[in-house]
Image (cartoon, rainbow, N blue to C red):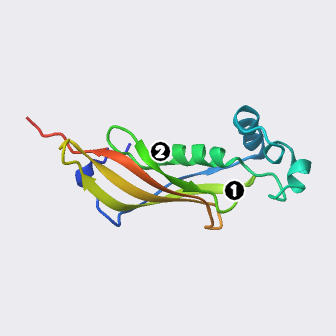
Amino acid sequence: MTAPLYLDDLHVGQTFVTPSVIVTAEEIKAFARQFDPQPFHLDEAAARDSLFGGLAASGWHTAALSMRLLVDGLPIAGGLIGVGGETAWPRPTRPGDTLTVHLEIIEITPSKSRPDRGMVRTRNETRNQHGEPVQISNLGIVAWRRPVEP
């Protein structure tokens, strides 16, 4: 297990690459049945006739996978607590895609009112096995300062 990272350990321009996950057609359909039951996420034939031209994961499935990868690959002390952001899906996630999140710290703002924490702004790209982004997010994350030893 990697040691937890505190605000004091982070710097602008720092990058992280998470572990990877392979997406299966069965997982795409299972997620869609429960959370986004649209034909292009559930049925190959219907998906071929859609804008996607084939089975595609829900963007929310890609987001959930990305979150899991970030939790596994970015050991922020106290957990990954998001405080807003923007997400786009420039291309679909397909069965057989291998996803990896590439994160860059773009801004760090220590809190003036709460000296035990700060805000870290990140740019995250979830990329497939070809290096193509399937999700791009700009997110704010709470990061804690290293506790002072007594």
Residue at image mark 2: 72
Give the percent coordinates (x, y) of residue 90: 65, 62
Task: Please tell me whether residue 139 is drawn above or below residue 113 in the rendered image.
Answer: below
Front-most of residues 20 and 14: 14
Query: Which quarter of the image is occupied by the N terminus?
Result: top left
Furthest toward the left, the residue is 150
**What separation in Å lies between label 2 and label 1 (alpha carbons)?**
19 Å
The residue depicted at 71 percent of the width and 57 percent of the height is 92
Task: Please tell me whether residue 91 is drawn above or below residue 46 in the rendered image.
Answer: below
Amino acid type assigned to the residue bearing label 1 in the image: Asp
Give the percent coordinates (x, y) of residue 30: 74, 36
The residue depicted at 86 percent of the width and 44 percent of the height is 43
In the rendered image, is residue 3 in sight?
Answer: no
The residue depicted at 72 percent of the width and 32 percent of the height is 34
The residue depicted at 63 percent of the width and 67 percent of the height is 132
Q: Mark on residue 132?
A: none
Query: Which quarter of the image is occupied by the C terminus?
Result: top left
Residue at image mark 1: 97
Element type where label 2 sits in the image: helix
Furthest toward the front, the residue is 113
